[in-house]
Image: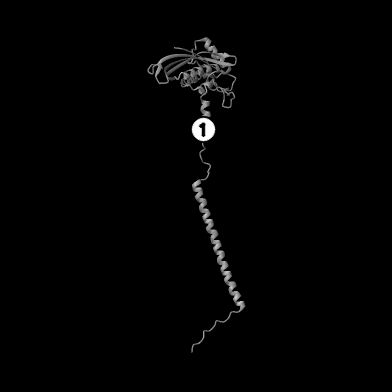
Amino acid sequence: MIMPCARPPALAAEDLAGAISGDLQKAGQMGNGFQFLDIILFAMVAAFLVLRLRNVLGKKTGHQRERQNPFAERSQEMNEDKVVELPNRRADNGAEPDFEDDEETAAQAHRPDPAYDSDDDRLVAGIENIREEDRFFDPAGFLEGANGAFEMIVRAFSAGELDRLQPLLAEDVFEQFRDAVEERARANETLETEITGISSSIVDAGMAGRDAVVTVCFKSGQINVTRDAENRIIDGDPNDVTEIEDIWTFRRDTQSADPNWKLVETGAQQ
């Protein structure tokens, strides 16, 4: 005889409700666990991305090299192109330097100087007049600057660089140079100048009101070649050095904070 399968005992309503509640609590605990793992996973991904961005973009440490300003560099170059500066004329802040205790410097400034003829009483007196306004006027230092100005002006004139000439010349002298440069340009001619050597000496000096005026004789060896629009030589010889004597006069206001001299007169004798 086959016995019928026995039915499991029926659960009471309270037992069924308890079983369902237990299962829900377990499911809730598992859900909370998964949410916690998700938060940790997202935090790890975010940290990884931050580190990657820092590696790619870098970070400012305070040791980065400053970017140079080309306009500031250009301004400095232009300031260095100014004419002749009197050594020890003024301090950086524009005030007169204090040399009261510097007897050696003062004595050195008044020693006989090969920059001029110390036997020329008139010239010596003129230099002393300048030193009354600027007791540290140094003829040798001035002459060194004048030589640099001479070469700069000659080369700028040859190249037709009027913007470089203008700060170095008095207004009327600049107009003469400008007219010559423009006339050369209208004729489609170019001038090539090479200075092979230069010597100079102060031949006159003195005060004109509050202005110091110094005249210099420049003796230079130059090669000057003029070419036409077809690059053919129409004047000069590239192998011929010509000895030229120039008489130039420089002037500056001794009461001005500007230490630069300007060329106020030119003359040449070949």
Q: Is residue 269 above or below residue 8?
A: above
Q: Where's residue 65, x and y in %?
A: 51, 38
Instruction: Please name whichever residue, 223 or 198, is drawn nearer the observer in this view of the structure.
Output: 223
Count of marks, rendered view: 1
**Image quadrant in which you'd find residue 188:** top left
Identify the image quadrant of the C terminus: top left
Q: Position of residue 218 (x, y in %)?
A: 46, 15
The residue lying furthest to the bottom in this view is: 1
Residue 155 in the image, given as x and y percentages of width and height: 46, 21
Q: Amino acid at mark 1?
A: Pro
- Can residue 104 be seen in this snapshot? no
The single residue placed furthest to the right in the displayed view is 14
Which residue is label 1 attached to? 70
Q: Name the residue located 51 percent from the left edge and 48 percent from the top edge.
A: 54
Residue 136 or residue 262, whichever sits in front? 262
Where 102 sits versus 19, above or below?
Answer: above
Bin the neighbour count of mark 1 within 10 Å (Cα to Cα): few under 14, some 14-19, many 20 and up.
few
Q: Position of residue 12 (x, y in %)?
A: 60, 79
Q: 11 or 257: which is nearer to us?
A: 11
Specify how the rendered protein is coloured: one colour
Q: Secondary structure at mark 1?
A: helix
Whether residue 36 appears in this view of the structure is yes
